[in-house]
Amino acid sequence: MNPRSSFSGVFAACWLGLSIMGCQGAGDEPRAPGGDEEVEVPSPRPEVPETPEPETPAPVAVTLPCEVRAGACSEFIGTGQGDIWVDGRNLPPSRYAGKTLCIKPGNYGYLALYGVVATPSQPAIVTNCGGQAVFTSTSGSPVSMGGGSRFLRLTGTGSADHVYGLVAGRSGGNQAHVDLREGTSDVEIDHIEVRGDGKGGVGIAFRTYPTCSGTWKRGTWTQNNTRIHDTWVHDTRYEGMYIGPSHHGWKAGNGYAPGFDCGGGVRVEEADVIGVEVVDNVLENLGNDGIQVGGALSGMSVRRNRVRDYGLNNDSNHSGGITVNPGSGGVIDGNWIETARPNSTSGIVFQGLGGSLVSNNVIVGARTGTYFLRNTDVNVDRAETDILFHHNTVVASTVEGAYFFCNLLGDVRFTNNIIAGAPTTHAANGNDLSCFKSPAPYNLLSTQISAAGFVDAAARDFHLLPSSPAVDVGVALGGVVDVDHAGASRAGGPYDLGAFVASKTPVTGGSLRQ
């Protein structure tokens, strides 16, 4: 099969069912997704006001000249229109090592890189120059990488007039707007806008599922060094970001059978994902999950992202603001997750690894603030360790602030949090709260928002008033949580509860710090 047609024209995109089944069957050929019917989305609740617009990264200070010379472009791969197809098969890494591959301003069809490999010390840079480059496709993904492409940076920092110099616009056939697969690894993505129209697929998909013949299975390949930052993803039909596989692990247990299902009782182990950094992104108006990460065995960091209005398809299996899938463990810190359309949403869905730290997050308006489904330590043959849930602020959940499946969980260390304004502050499957380790009085749990003593909850200012009952009553977590959501130090006295301290000096944080 022609690589171009199979790679960018027939990318299977059965995103709606990916957390239950994969996108490839026993025959290893891509499977088409379901129908393209429109999904009716309820109107926003009038009592939940609009969220203030998040800060965006500052534009780059200097425009990259569209010139082939030192300090500018090594070569042009886009001259202003048409499709861009870069085929690196059978070329040595020296062909692309340290090169800057420039795209001139204009409106294009697709951008596809296949088998393009540079080196770890000299990655290739694919960037716009002199203005904004916009990609749209009616038949596939407007931006894609495959064929084992590696050691690349895809960046939209080539124009001082544009925060997002590369735009992945319309996508055809339910396919991802930015799609990295087929053994793609070691890629940085930044300053890119995903401009969905509600009829494409996932915003940014970076995962390789194994085939049923064993290609890309665990032990033969690893997805390393995934870095996505300073992007704007909006109006997608399915997930905002889909990173790593959904069924990671190699040992059944704890109510979960890992592996890619090839039918007939045959399951193929999905590859490990090592090193995932998802930082300072803005994601808005998303059909399914905001950010989903699976198989990230080590080095996962999901920080300072803004996720707004997710789960618009009202699918209870795919409606997490941030979803930590099996085999993933690390830090989920300083994110702002909000929706005015609670539907079936959960601010954070956790079915990852013990030892993970969930801290300094603000969750507003979800049906369930945080949904603790299971530990998957046993599925990667590890001893089960505690999940750490510290210094989070959960406001105005429409059903419960936190929900636990303690029959599938180890202990959840639940400390220094605020849950306010939920009809039920916390609940559990079968009323079994044995895993909920909440040392009194080190949490504020109330059905009333006013009980928390926020500066101005209606204006989304969840800092604490000096008179708040959450001030100076927390347990010190030095070395675990040292700063708050805004980057203010927690040192120098008793800890305050929630994501924000009452009144301490801010330190420099990321672009999305509130």
Image: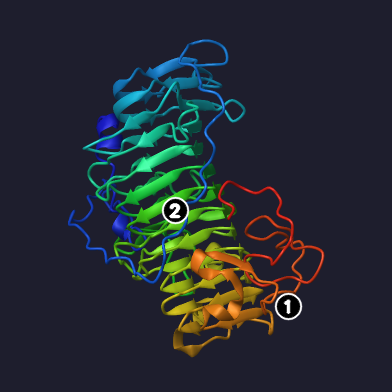
Element at label 2: loop
Amino acid at the residue labelled 2: Glu
Q: Nearer the viewer, residue 76 or 206?
A: 76
Identify the mark at residue 270; answer none if there is no mark: 2
Horizontal arrangement in the rendering, residue 355 relative to residue 474 (left or right): left
Q: Which residue is mark 1?
A: 473
* Direction from residue 77 to residue 410 in the image, left or right: right
- Using the rendered image of the protein, determine whether residue 283 is visible from the camera's viewpoint: yes
| Whole-percent x, y for residue 184 in the image | 45, 38
Looking at the rendered image, the quarter that the C terminus falls into is bottom right
Residue 457: x, y in percent?
A: 53, 69
> Crowding at label 2, few (<14), some or many (≥20) Cα neighbours within 10 Å?
many
Nearer to the camera, 215 or 434? 434
Dot in front, 2 or 1: 1
List x then y, in percent, for residue 25: 28, 53
User: Up-down: is 69 above or below 91?
Assistant: above
Task: Give 490 or 203, whichever is nearer the viewer.
Answer: 490
Tell me if 316 is positioned left or right of 503 in this view.
Answer: left
Q: Secondary structure at mark 1?
A: loop
Vertical arrangement, residue 184 with respect to residue 428, above or below: above
Q: In which quadrant of the rendered image does the N terminus lie?
A: top left
Circle 1: residue type: Val
Mark 1 neighbour density, 10 Å: few (under 14) some (14–19) many (20 or more)? some
Say whether disc 2 or disc 1 marks the residue closer to the N-terminus: 2
